[in-house]
Amino acid sequence: MTDTVTSTPTPAPTPPPRKSRVGGSRLAAVLRLREFPVALALILLVLITYAANPLFLSPQGTKDLLLNATIIIILAVGQAIVIITRNVDLSVGSILGLVAFGTGSLFANVPGIPIIAVFAVGLAFGAILGAINGLLVTLARVPALVITLGTLYIYRGLNNAWAGGTQYFAGDRPDEFGALSVDTILGFPIITLLAVLVVVIVAIVMAGTRAGRDLYAIGSDPDAATLFGIPVGRRVFIAFAVNGLLAGLAGVLYASRFNSVGATTGTGLELDVVAAAVVGGVAIFGGSGSVVGAAIGALLLTTITSALTALRVDKFWQQAIVGVLILAAIIIDRVASIRTARRLRMSEARDV
Amino acid sequence: MELFRTRTGRATRARRIATIAASAATIALIATGCAAGGGSESGEGSGAEGDQTITFIPKQLNNPYTDVVLGGGEEGAEEAGFASSAVVGPLDASASSQVSFINAETQAGTNVIVIAANDPDAVCSALEEARTGGAKIVAFDSDANPDCRDVFISQVVAKEVALIQVELIAEQIGGAGEIAILSATANATNQNEWIKFMEEELASNPDYADIELVAKVYGDDDDTKSFQEAQGLMQAYPNLKGIISPTTVGIAATARYLSESEYKGKVALTGLGLPNEMRPFVKDGTVTEFALWDPAQLGYVAAFAGKALADGDITGAVGDTFEAGELGEREIEEGGIVIVGPPTVFNADNIDDYDF
Amino acid sequence: MSDPRSTETVEPTATSTVSADTTKTLRDEPRGRTGWARILLGRDAIMIYLLIATIIIAMISIPRFASPVTVGFLLLDVIPVLLIAMPMTLIIITGEIDLSVASIAGLTSALMGVLWQAGWDIGIVLVLGLVIGVLAGMFNGFLVAVFGLPSLAVTIGTLALFRGLALVVIGDNAVANFPPELTGFFTSKIGATGIPTVMIGVVLIVAVFGVILHFTPFGRGLYALGFSTEAARFVGIHVARSKFWLYVASGGVSALAGIFWTLRYSSARSDNASGLELAVIAAVLLGGVSIFGGKGSIPGVVAGVLLIGTINYALRLGRVSDVVLIIVTGTLLIASVVAPSIFDAVKRRRHDRRVRRELPQAQPSGSVSA
């Protein structure tokens, strides 16, 4: 992360993965954005639900909607960083669980500890767990799927061993800490604003810095990235560490929002998070997509759950709908990339 | 092709060394695991009287309510004279996950298996097999299929606990309005029985004629899920006046949601909760009154029932009686059920007197 | 995925800093083993030794482990994983993956419950259970093989979709009253051996997959596919068709596992077998199948499945908490993939140093490709 300051106008060694053509109108460019279909789906969903049940967008309804999405948004942003490098991290649910329990136990065992210190410890803890993943993946050169499947079990096991039957409840934590997920600024809960801040920062880093562009290059073609002199191992390692850090943040926020943290906190979250990223247009084989898309994907998935309840639709449909959305996202992605490839071929042919 | 061959040749040897190393590590791991497990089991024998063993299989390990129940159970097991007691169980409360634990206990020759069934039928054939092997089966907390257990230790009379919750909610909402139930899993035997009695009471008792049960939702005893179900109820039923949550996880999660939302104090909440978990919500006014029995007594009585069965003092027939330590004599009632005691109602005045 | 340029690299590892010219053999480099030595010292054989060692340790240190009862309970526990591991092995060898297997089993279970509840004949219920699995597999196969979509993403989607359909079909209900003769059959044992009767069918299925993979041109073709889709196409392998049928097989076998699950526990529910996909993949990888494709064998996988099953059962019999169990599972999984590649890396570095010493003109840093 040493060379993040240098901005991109210098001719980057790797071509950006997608470049909107100069000739197309601005509208067409927006329509071609990867984030467009998922954003459209989200808007339609919210409008339809609102029309059927106005309570859906009442101040309390909106607040709940945003709060529900907050934690998944943060996790999806971290996951997007990792997926863009053609890796995946399945252990995020377990990391979140460990950090959430750690947060509970810090407040319980160190009375009067400043909240900011708890955040620092939580983030560092998450980053370490993520770094272990990164180290194993980069050093051993084994697919992240396998490594993080292993650490998914191991971290969860450690969480169980550490927590046993102990749970820490909201009552054990200072009121100001719980207030983070209750109080609002301009209708936005504080922790949601925090999540938005995370999305903005990461999006800027990914799009505007050398290190961020490198991640796309690595995901598009690891071998070529190596040849171009990109420190692939180091970049991938940092991607995992940052993902762990964000999972740690999500863990701390989980402890602020929910009543109890214990041995099973965050179980099964990994597939929701990967699904959010994929629905948001992050290609599972790396190299394309954006963290903004992943964040919108996360918002869409959590909004579906709330919308179904608000519409009193049988909640059993929810998971099937999520499945259909994921498949739709992949197919849209494939169609778009075929069209881009054809356009590229045609323009190349013209140039020749 | 030459390229492949030489490469694989080299790789194979390295891989072999690596695999041997990994094997050694694994064997070491297993050996330590076994040693750790074996240690606590020394001196355990099967059959002989005075040398009996008892194992508790809760719905799921690492659940605070379960821990209190098991604490009472282990105390009871010691007082009743079991040579050793153990607690085993799955980390997730799924239907089939308890079966392999029952199998292992069958094989270990455990004399008494005390189980809280996640699914009354899924555990049935495994329990049947355990009985064939000579074990006595005591169900507690949540019943197994009556065909495959000897007795069921019930917290309270099912109807009584259902009625007390309806009474509490009626009182808190002023006897009229919409209410909802937030339960655990849809298949939990105990939950469904209570809900059935609640529905019957609401339909038949003229005092409750103005109360309408509009929804039943399931939080699966998962904190996050229960929380979101509570939230969904508010949105889907704007006129909701009260919620009954007959499960400790559900009531705590709902209380947490209400306490931080605009519905605090407007929507009443009652049900079954642990005093330690509910204390802040009673103090801040989110919850006025809720109920529960003493969970430790449940485990305690189950241990004594197991002892009486193993000694052959009772067979599980209706009318059999046994001594349950300091809790006195208990009788087996219709359906092979033993009742532990009446529920307690907790509120701001008495909640500090309890610690569980 | 299918980037034509990367076909010559055997394993698309993240970083290969030094890829020196490997076409020349060095004088004192060890040769590949042949004949018996190769079989007795191969990865599969080691998995089997490991399994035997584990069983012996368990027999010595855990009272009552050494009994036919163990065989029965242990096998009943591993059957679903063992079944699904068979098509999964073939799929991973071709470089793809199927994460939807447990959801297919759940969907089968849910459908069986609803049909049986509605009073259908049990024979038809079983057939339709199998049919729905095959259809689900065809759906996966269509998206992956015909459309060429990435299998990881597709099967994450169908994992949610099929489980969701199971919920839609049966909701929160559980159906338990299957015919006792049938549920009894599924837990019955062959005489005094303790071996479950259904093992006969399971062994047959394992044998079929073993023969297909190791003794047919189709099976050999799968390895080629895993190494390089392009090369496989060149030598005349029907890439799309092969993959399609593998997913169909995976759907069918997952449905069988769902049927077994439903009748063994005599409980049809939407959440049956949930999470099983991770256990299956862990066992398959532990059994020596490379996640990159192109490597692996049925005997190795069977040993891998049984190894995890044995550790599981032994620890439970020894009343060691499941906490230890999941930590051991995770560690085993990582150790089984990390250890070989670390040794490979050390080996490679030593080899590269020797190349540089003996062939001074060889250039480090792969200027070969690009």
Image: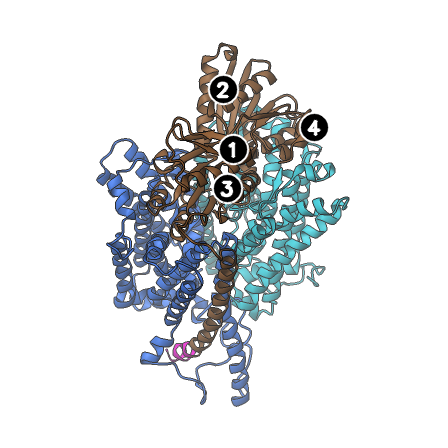
Asked which quadrant contains residue B120, the reply is: top left
Labels 4 and 3: the sequence-earlier one? 3
Dot 3: element: helix
The amino acid at mark 1 is Leu
The magenta segment is B1-9
* Residue contact at pointers 2 and 3, CB within 8 angstroms: no
Q: How far apart are marks 1 and 2 (CA)?
A: 29 Å
Q: Residue B80 carries which label?
A: 3
Dot 2: element: strand
The amino acid at mark 3 is Ala
**Crowdedness of circle 4 by 10 Å Cα count: few (<14), some, many (20+)?**
some
Q: Which residue is drawn at 40% across and 71% down?
A: C46
* Residue contact at pointers 1 and 3, CB within 8 angstroms: no
Residue that badge 2 annotates: B213
Asked which quadrant contains residue C218, the reply is: bottom left
**Crowdedness of circle 3 by 10 Å Cα count: few (<14), some, many (20+)?**
many
Residue that badge 4 annotates: B283
- Report whether mark 2 lies on the same chain as mark 3: yes
- Report whether mark 1 lies on the same chain as mark 2: no
Dot 1: element: helix
Q: Is residue C224 left or right of residue C318?
A: left
* Disc nearest the viewer among 4 and 3: 3
Vertical relation: C159 (above or below) C346: above
Check the residue under mark 4 and report the chain it is in: B
